Image (spheres, rainbow, N blue to C red):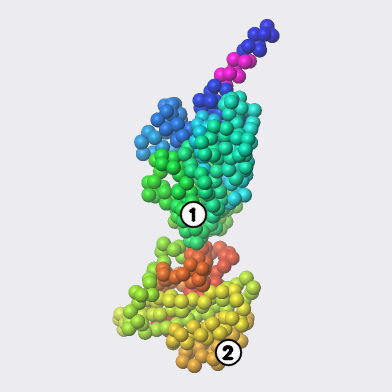
Amino acid sequence: MQVTNELELTSIDALEIELARRDAWEYCLYQIPELFNSRPHLKPVAHLIQWMVQKEDTPEEVKKSVIESDYLRDYNGSGIINSACINMPPRAGKSVTMSVCAAWALGKYPELAIMRNCCTATLYMKFSYATRDIIRSEQWQNVFPGLGLSPDKQNISGWSLTKSNDGAYFGAGVGGTIIGMGATLIAMTDDLYKGYADAISPKTLESVRMWNQSAHDSRCESGCPSLDIGTEWSKNTIMGEGKVNKDYDLVLIIPALINDKSFCENVFTTEDYQKKKTKLFRTDLGKAIWAAEYQQEPTEIAGTLFPLSKLKRFKLSDINMDNINARIGVADIADSGKDFFALPFAYGIVNDVQAIELDYEFYIVDVIYTQDNIDITKPKTIEKTDYHKLDYLLIETNAAGHQFYRNVKMAVKDTSVRGEFTSSHKETRILMASDLILNHFYFRDDYEEGSDYALFIEHLTSYLKLVPNQVDDPADSLAGLAQFIRKMFG
C-alpha cells in the first residue's frame, strides 16, 4: 500500500509539473500557491503574458481566459498580441506576477531575452533579484530541468541562462542606460511613474516619454511584443496616450471596486476600500487619486487648474510689436526660503470692442523665477524692467516686499512702479483669475529647457485647484497680473 501511495504521489507531482510547464497560470500556482490561489484576478494577467510570448502557438483555452475575462476593456481581434496594457490598483500582485511569468517564459524560451523597465533603478534591481531568485528555486528547476543561470553572468543588473544567446534578463530605471542587449522575448514596463505628482508634471511626463522612446523602444528587436503594466495615473502618461491612440492590441483594466464590491477580498476588503474612498473624497486631490490609483479612471489631468493642453501658446516671432500697447510686470516676492520670486513680463494688445467693454490678450514674453535672494533678484528686476520698457510694474509689498518696492522704484525711471499689499485668500484669488489666465494669456512654447521660463511653466501646470500646493508662486503671480489688468482695463 505504501508503494502505491508513493506511485500516486509521484504521478500527481509529474502532472502538476507538466501543467506548470505548459501553462503560465499553472506555473504561478505551482511556484507560489498560497498567493495565487487567493487571487484569481491574476489568471488573465498570466495568460496574457503567455499569449504574447507564445504567439501563434498559444492554446485556445489560454486566449479564451483573457478574452472572456471580466477585466477585458479593448481587443482588436488580431489573434496575436504584439502590444498590451494592464492597469490594476496597488497591492494587487502585478509585479510578482510579472516576475513569476518572466521566469516561466525564459524557461520555455531560454535562448531569448526579456527587458523589464520601471520608474527607478532601485525598483528595477528589486524586480531583477526576485526573478533571478525564482530561477534558482527548486520549483523552477523541477519544471525546467537542465536549465539554470549562466555561471559567469549572474549580475543583478543583467543576467543570462546557460542557453542564452545574448543575455536573458536586463533593464533599468527611467533615465538609466540600457546598452549591449536587445529584447527578443518580451519588453515590459512596470510602473514608469513614481506617483500622481510625476503623472501631472509636464517636465516628468516629457522626460519619461523621451526616455521610453530613446532607451526602451530602441532595445526592442523586430517582432518583440511589448507589455505596459501599472497604475493609470493620467491620460497623458505613456499608457494613457497609448489607449487613446489605439496603440494596444489588448487592454486589461482591474478597478478596486466593481459595482461597489472589492475586486478581490484577499487584497483589500470592500469595507477597506470604502474607508479609503471616504477618506480620499475629502479633497479634490483625493478624489483624483482615488479615480486614478484605485479605479484606473483618470480624468484629464485631474484636479489641475492650468493643464498644459489648455494653455494658449505662442512664439516670440509671432508677436507684431506694432500692435503692442501695454507692457506690464507683476512681482510676487518670496516670503520664505522655500518660496520662489516670480515676476512675469506681459506684452498686451488692448482693443476697444464697445464703449463699455474691452477686449485684450497678453503674451507672457519673459519671467524671473528663482529662489535667489534679494541681492540677485533686485538688480535682475531693474535690468529687465528697463529692457522690456514696462509701462507698469506692480510689486507685492507683503513682508520684505515693501523695502524691495522702495529700492526698485528709486532705480527705475521710465516705468510706473506701484506697490500693493495682498490680503485676499490666495487660492480663491488664483481660482477667480483662472478664466482670464486661460482665455486671455498666451505662454511661450519656444523657451529653453532649464530656463526660468521652463520651471515657471512646470510649476504652473502642476498647480492643483483648491488643495494645498507646495509651489503656487507662478499661479499667484499670474493672478496678481490678472487682477491688475482688470483694474486697468476693465
> In the rendering, which numbered label is found on residue 55?
none
Q: Mark 1 or 2, which is nearer the eye?
A: 1
Q: Residue 406 bears which disc, if any?
A: 2
Q: Answer with left or right where residue 241 lies relative to residue 428.
A: left
Q: Compared with residue 256, is residue 437 higher up or lower down, i.e. above or below?
A: below
The answer to whether residue 35 is above or below residue 84 is: above
In the image, what residue occupies the spot 55% across and 78% down? 332
Looking at the rendered structure, which numbered label has been put on residue 211? Answer: 1
Q: Residue at coordinates 50% horizontally, 88% vertically from top-left?
A: 417
Q: Amino acid at mark 2?
A: Arg
Within the image, what quadrant is residue 152 found in?
top right
Over which residues does the magenta segment extend?
Answer: 9-16
The part of the image, by quadrant, that contains residue 60 is top left
Residue at point 44%, 70% (across, down): 447
CA distance separating discs 1 and 2 = 48 Å
Q: Earlier in the sequence, mark 1 or mark 2?
A: 1
Near-viewer residue (252 or 169)? 169
Query: With respect to residue 29, does 341 lie above or below?
Result: below
